[in-house]
Image: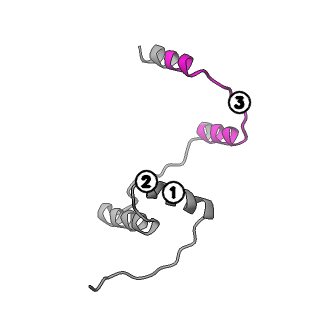
Amino acid sequence: MATNKIRTHIYIDRDIKEQAQKLFSQFNISLSDAINLFLTQSVLNKGIPFRIEIPNEETQQAIKEAREKKNMQEIDFENFKEEIKQCVN
């Protein structure tokens, strides 16, 4: 059976590749299959098949602090659920 596939080479971050392969294995698909899904959806959508946004300054600062483990506090899950309930009501 003839296929219309070609080999291509891309450079990707080693850690991201390993994490992605682990994730995709849960769906029983290969990294190659996942890339083909992304490219197919890009063509069908005539663009990136998901939103790409630049976080605002406040969010960027929060991300930076989280990566530096600043302003972090442990929370009790039960207390957290109660706080969420209060915000919803």
Magenta-drawn stretch contains 67: yes
Magenta span: 59-82
Q: Is residue 83 left or right of residue 38?
A: right
Secondary structure found at label 2: loop
Neighbour tally class for label 3: few under 14, some 14-19, many 20 plus, Cα within 10 Å: few
Q: Nearer the viewer, residue 47 or 1?
A: 1
Q: Nearer the viewer, residue 30 or 46?
A: 30
The picture quadrant where one finds residue 64 is: top right
Tell me the number on the disc at residue 71: 3
Kind of residue at badge 1: Lys
Q: Is residue 56 left or right of residue 47?
A: right
Secondary structure found at label 1: helix
Residue assigned mark 1? 22
Asked if residue 2 is positioned above or below residue 44 in the image, the reply reads: below
Q: Main secondary structure of the magenta part?
A: helix
Asked if residue 48 is positioned above or below residue 78 in the image, the reply reads: below
Asked if residue 75 is positioned above or below residue 4 in the image, the reply reads: above
Quadrant assignment for the C terminus:
top left
3 or 2: mark nearer the eye: 2
